[in-house]
Image (spheres, rainbow, N blue to C red):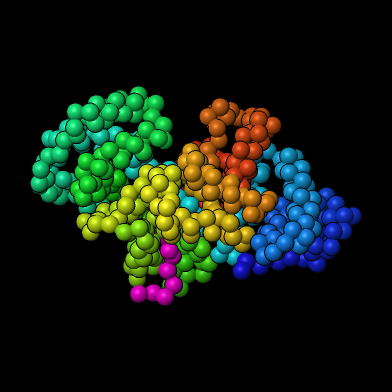
């Protein structure tokens, strides 16, 4: 378990509830140190709370948590967003060195490497379904660039009614008006049409512009554990992306890894190295490497709500694992390239937040559009924007440009 230095003064101020000493430390020590000590205290209190069996045991712990949360909020209000970011990265760095951090990767990580956005991926699937000429040759990407082609066995067509729905969905996507539900339903229409050939069309769309993994994956691999490396590494890596760009970068960097995904409704583990120590990559929504692979039994899902619909009535091993990890008080999710638009996943986060009050996960998030080109950002407005993430148990770490992400990740070293 993560156990950083916890000085006697801070222990007496926080655990002993010495208000005078607490105020003195808050007033005199470096604010980054103060915020880290408060975060560490909240983690320890949450570990105790996690083990509580009755309300009587929980009440004094909750009082201590409430006391520290209010001070944390007050301290943060004294600094602008860039200073708060510095303090949060320093705290996250300490947790990383305790091997308590697990990156959660969204579409933004793959888009930085040239991969498609979700709307672009679904648009490509719809075009393939609506224009059968595209189905005559199946392009298969090679690592490092280039293609080879397989001959399509037959052209598949929507029924007249479904074609009407597909064209309407395509028009909405191309106009920029598609929401999560429309994208999910359109993707499912294509999956139903292509069936066992579905992966054949998803693969080229995923890797069309991805010759090699991008700089975000490089930064993540640099901080992963590998034979002979002094790095503590990640607790695990969770990805909502179908591609294997994280795995490809691990192979380039000599980092042993495993892949966990769903096959036939159960977790399927594939270890890509003989090493006893490897980084586990959990593919929540499906797994599509660049190379041809057996796809029977592997289920694609385009959102957590769709995953719940598929597996909600039976054991949902991957989602149950995610729920458990998000609730554990001594593990910290580090969201990268995630948009937080998946309502079902947000509900899972909110439920986890109830179990670990004040003990926030972290997310690299681009400043809201109204602030991206503004030098002087109104802090009160930005703090209000943060509140909706804090309700999910997630502390935003803001940045201006996506190109800033690799450098921010590297600060955890």
Outermost residue on the front side: it is 313
Residue nearest the observer in this picture, 379 or 222: 379
Region of the chain picked out in magenta, as a range: 274-281
Residue nearest the observer in this picture, 202 or 108: 202
> Would you place residue 298 above or below residue 153 in this image?
below
Measuring from the top left, give residue 104's x and y in whole percent: 48, 52
> Which quadrant holds the C terminus?
bottom right
In the rendered structure, the answer to whether residue 19 lies left or right of residue 220 reads right
Q: Going 54% across and 45% down the picture, which residue do you hit?
A: 347
Measuring from the top left, give residue 246's x and y in whole percent: 38, 55
> Would you place residue 314 above or below residue 139 in this image?
below
Q: Is residue 223 visible?
A: no
Q: Is residue 19 visible?
A: yes
Q: Going 31% across and 35% down the picture, which residue do you hit?
A: 186
The quadrant where residue 386 appears: top right
Q: Going 10% across and 43% down the picture, which residue do you hit?
A: 154
Measuring from the top left, give residue 192's x and y in whole percent: 25, 42
In magenta segment, residue 12: no
> Which quadrant holds the N terminus?
bottom right
Q: Going 77% across and 42% down the picture, which residue do you hit?
A: 74
């Amino acid at each position: 378990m993560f156990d950083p230095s916890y000085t006697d003064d801070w222990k007496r101020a926080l655990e002993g509830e010495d208000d005078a000493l607490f105020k003195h430390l808050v007033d005199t020590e470096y604010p980054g140190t103060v915020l880290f000590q408060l975060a560490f205290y909240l983690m320890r209190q949450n570990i105790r709370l996690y083990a509580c069996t009755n309300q009587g045991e929980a009440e004094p712990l909750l009082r201590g948590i409430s006391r520290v949360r209010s001070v944390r909020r007050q301290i943060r209000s004294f600094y602008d967003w860039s200073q708060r970011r510095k303090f949060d990265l320093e705290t996250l760095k300490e947790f990383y060195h305790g091997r308590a951090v697990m990156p959660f990767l969204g579409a933004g990580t793959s888009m930085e490497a040239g991969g498609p956005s979700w709307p672009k991926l679904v648009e490509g699937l719809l075009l393939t379904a609506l224009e059968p000429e595209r189905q005559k040759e199946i392009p298969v990407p090679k690592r490092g660039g280039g293609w080879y082609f397989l001959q399509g066995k037959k052209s598949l067509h929507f029924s007249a009614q479904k074609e009407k729905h597909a064209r309407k969905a395509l028009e909405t996507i191309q106009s920029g008006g598609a929401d999560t539900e429309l994208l999910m339903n359109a993707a499912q229409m294509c999956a139903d049409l292509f069936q066992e050939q579905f992966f054949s069309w998803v693969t080229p769309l995923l890797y069309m512009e991805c010759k090699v993994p991008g700089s975000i994956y490089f930064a993540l691999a640099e901080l992963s554990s590998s034979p002979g490396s002094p790095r503590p590494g990640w607790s695990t890596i969770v990805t909502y992306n179908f591609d294997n760009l994280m795995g490809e970068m691990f192979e380039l960097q000599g980092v042993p890894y495993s892949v966990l995904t769903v096959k036939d409704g159960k977790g399927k583990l594939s270890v890509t190295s003989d090493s006893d120590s490897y980084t586990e990559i959990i593919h929540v929504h499906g797994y599509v490497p660049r190379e041809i692979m057996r796809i029977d039994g592997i289920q694609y899902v385009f959102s957590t709500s769709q995953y719940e619909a598929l597996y909600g009535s039976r054991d949902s091993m991957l989602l149950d694992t995610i729920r458990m990890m998000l609730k554990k008080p001594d593990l910290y999710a580090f969201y990268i390239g995630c948009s937080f638009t998946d309502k079902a996943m947000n509900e899972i986060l909110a439920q986890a937040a109830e179990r670990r009050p004040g003990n926030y996960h972290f997310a690299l998030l681009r400043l809201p559009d109204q602030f991206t080109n503004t030098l002087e950002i109104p802090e009160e407005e930005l703090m209000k924007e943060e509140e909706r993430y804090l309700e999910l148990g997630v502390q935003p770490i803001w940045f201006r440009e996506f190109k800033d992400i690799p450098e921010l990740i590297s600060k955890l070293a």
